[in-house]
Amino acid sequence: MAARVLTPRSEDFPRWYQDVVAKAEMAENGPVRGTMVIRPYGTAIWERMQREVDDRIKAAGAANVSFPLFIPESYLQREAEHVEGFSPELAVVTHAGGKDLEERVVVRPTSETVFGEYMAKWIQGHRDLPLLLNQWANVVRWELRPRIFLRTTEFLWQEGHTAHATEADARDYALRILHEVYRDFMVEVLGIPLFVGRKTARERFAGAINTLTCEAMMGDGKALQMGTSHELGQNFAKVFGIDYLDSEGELQLTWTTSWGVSTRMIGGLIMAHGDDDGLRLPPRLAPTQVVVLVVRDDEECHERARLMAEEMRLAGMRVSLDDRTEISFGRRSTEWELKGVPVRVEVGPRDLAQGVVTVVRRDLPGDDPARKSVTGVVEMAQAVADALEAAQWSLHDQAVARVTERLADVSSLPDAIEAAATGFARIPWSLVGDEGEDALAEHAVTVRCLQRADGSVPLSADEPDLVAIVARSY
RNA sequence: CGGGUAGUAGCGCAGCUUGGUAGCGCGCCUCGUUCGGGACGAGGAGGUCGUGGGUUCAAAUCCCGCCUACCCGACCA
């Protein structure tokens, strides 16, 4: 077995999380509180996320743009709820160019207001709608209690902003992004099971009329909001004048949406799949899917490993070759395990003499006999491809098993609070309500989302027989 | 933002009580022996003791401010 390099999750989960971030060389804290330096491996993971999410956003018809980092403070102030929600978290530039600024400038905490200003300019008639935009950017929200990847003062994200002719179009699009972009990516690529639903009024985005959310259960039973999609109604259209002439020649206000996912997903990925040996990456996401490990400094081993890596690359896999034989085998194995590379191929003289190699799966625990298998050199590429496919779903299924185990159906607030100590509780929304949310909040428990009985997303919080998913959260 | 704890080599820590030559383990570099789950030996490099000020002949050590991290609360997509 691998030597202990991390604090075990059962001993101290937050400490384990920090250990993984550091030991897998993903990121470290920046010099200013709440900022982070994302290292090459963390960046590679984020780039994979970006690629997968971006492809889906484009498939949903949106185009990428780039808006400024600085926003005039007056823009924020136009939408009452929006300012109120964000002002405590704003970083404001008051001094620049060697003098005090006449109009203060905020560092964007999100870009609804600037997008609003320009969408108003670009939209004239109904033929300009819908306008579907997205940008990949950094944003700043001054955080009092930062946690690397999960809640940082500066973070990277994607923010989509759209304008539609009708409320129904806007509603459909917000829901479409939630399902076809976010849920599809998180379930199919990240292998993380989700609770998708609608936020209660108090958990809603500042300035939205509805917020849809993807909530995931972490390894310690707490919830993480992985992505949100908002219907903004006509709130921003009114204050920024985002209007158009309809086919009758009448001036109409548009209906807008916004939606985003951030580097927080990296934290979610760590806490949803990681184990006591480190990160475990689902193959579809992993920057390196397979590492070919040269076991000993032996000419035959080097050459055969190189050829095998090349063969798998040609077959379309993302492969790294580890031929650093000056570092001991055990150390290198541990390192790749920490980094969560899904499959390892060990090429050593003992196996080669028999025409075989050892294939090791990261998703299975150390005592699982299926974890290591021996396969003929000729069948190796296929065996690895099969292992990758199996690992993708095995990680997903392990996460589903945890949800099943830690999700309790309850019928009282005290029971919900008790269940939230170790996981999620599902409780009829009629038993909670606004007062119930207050009572839960006293125990640091919140309503993560509202769902219909079958788990689908309700059209409004007023539908009958809704259930609330409640939990402690990050 | 309030309460608590901490900051000494890349990482983890001792030294501080009682002021007087900057230490240990891991990692790193070189050489040799090793090599199928964090190898071993020998030699070596690496420090404005978080930062600014104060007390003192003398400060890692005593005093004050600030910064940063962790825990608990409040706040927050």
Image (cartoon, grey):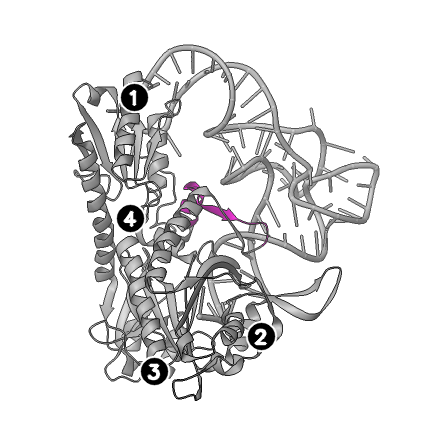
Q: Residues within 10 Å of mark 3 (few under 14, many from 20)?
A: some
Q: Residues within 10 Å of mark 2 (few under 14, many from 20)?
A: some
Pair 3/2: label in front: 2
Residue B65 percent across, percent down from the top left: 71, 57
Residue drawn at x 24%, y 19% as measured from the top left: A349
Q: Are marks 3 and 2 in contact (CB under 8 Å)?
A: no
Residue drawn at x 45%, y 54% as measured from the top left: A149
Q: Which residue is mark 3?
A: A433
Q: Is there one chain holding both mark 4 and mark 1? A: yes
Q: Which residue is mark 4?
A: A284
Residue A137 percent across, percent down from the top left: 49, 58
A24 within the magenta span: yes
Instruction: Give, as a single range, the part of the protein colored magenta.
Output: A18-32
Image position of A69 with respect to A168: above or below: above
Q: Which residue is mark 2?
A: A75
Find numbered disc 2 in the image and state the secondary structure of the residue it sits on: helix
Image position of A301 with respect to A267: above or below: above
Find numbered disc 3 in the image and state the secondary structure of the residue it sits on: helix
